[in-house]
Image (cartoon, grey):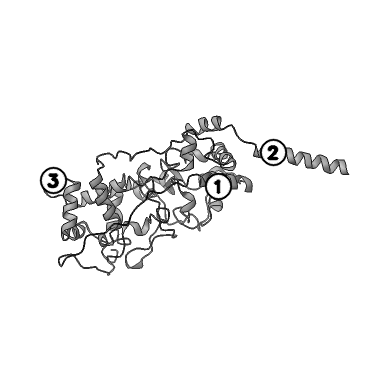
Amino acid sequence: MKRLITSVAACLFLATTAYTAELNPTELRQQAQELFKPLPSTVPAVKGNKITAEKIALGKALFFDPRMSASGVFSCNSCHNLATGGDDNLETSIGHGWQKGPRNSPTVFNAVFNIAQFWDGRAEDLKAQAKGPVQAGVEMANTPGQVVATLKSMPQYVEWFKAAFPGEADPVTFDNFAMAIEAFEATLITPAPFDSFLNGDDDALSAEAKRGLQLFMDKGCASCHAGINVGGEGYYPFGLIEKPGADVLPENDKGRFAVTNTADDSYVFRAAPLRNIALTAPYFHSGKVWGLKQAVAIMGTAQLGEKLEGNDVDLIVAFLESLTGRAPDVTYPVLPAETVTTPKPASQIIPVK
């Protein structure tokens, strides 16, 4: 009996040793570099929008200014809070008149690298995205004309627009409003330990994170979640193998179908970018799942057709935690003061026709 116990203990020790043995970091990195890219060390260029210091400063002010909403209560930062992972950590966002929005708010961090914006990709870039919530009745409930009137009522904003868009006869426009916000959001990049690993630092990831990365690639997670943003580069059905329940995948939200009106796009969504995912609960477009481990397990059955073992889930989560990056230092801006001509806040909700 003593010999049997010793033999079993030895086998368990060998199995544990084999499972936790350090992976070859060079081979793992080479495999990862075929699927992922590190974040750039400088602010990326944006198509059709030259990034300047003046434009970034203006965009920062606009991002934090609640007067861009009809009520004077909600700013871009309300739903994309830079202090809480670039989102609002709510199931779905609260907007004008305390209405509840239809989808979970994605993080604004690293959003410049997404193929398109919003869960259904209806905005081709951050300029288009910046215009959407301002005009949505359930979010900021404003109009382009009212935004421009508000900005022009404050001389400091007029000066800032002139500096950001030199040479334009009338720089205070809704298009320039959106371009300035895009310029600021392009700076919201969060370099993470995973980037250091991709750039050659063997010790940037823990042993658990390295094994999680290997699993993430081997299991097929990287088929949808790859590239510089570890996702955000394509559209895929949610429930590719096994459709989640209505509590996770609401039947009345068919995703990209509302954009393309194509049957094949029913329940198709942009793959979520996974950088900073450990900070941005709750998860999925419905915001119904609050635990990262639960979200990983759901993705295993729904997208891979595999019930992931508990230890595999833990290791994959360890890798996902290595995507938590260093947020840029952002000082809250001092905004221009209102004048007697600044439009007054409005709280009424315009009924949907």
Q: Provide residue 24's location: percent of width, then percent of height.
A: 59, 31
Where residue 143 sits, quadrant-wise, is bottom left
- Front in this rendered view, residue 269 or 289: 289
Q: Secondary structure at mark 3?
A: loop
Q: Is residue 41 visible?
A: yes
- Front in this rendered view, residue 224 or 64: 64
Q: Provide residue 269's location: percent of width, then percent of height.
A: 42, 47
CA gap, disc 1 and disc 3 = 50 Å
Where residue 141 sits, quadrant-wise, is bottom left
Q: Secondary structure at mark 2?
A: helix
Q: Pick whichever of labels 2 and 1 is earlier in the sequence.
A: 2
Mark 2 or mark 1, whichever is nearer to me: 2
Residue marked by disc 2: 17
Where residue 95 sits, quadrant-wise, is bottom left
Image: 205 above or below 338: above
Q: Amino acid at mark 1?
A: Val
CA gap, disc 3 and disc 2 = 67 Å
Q: Provide residue 331's location: percent of width, then percent of height.
A: 33, 54
Residue marked by disc 1: 317
Q: Amino acid at mark 3?
A: Glu
Residue marked by disc 3: 168
CA gap, disc 2 and disc 1 = 21 Å
Q: How many marks?
A: 3
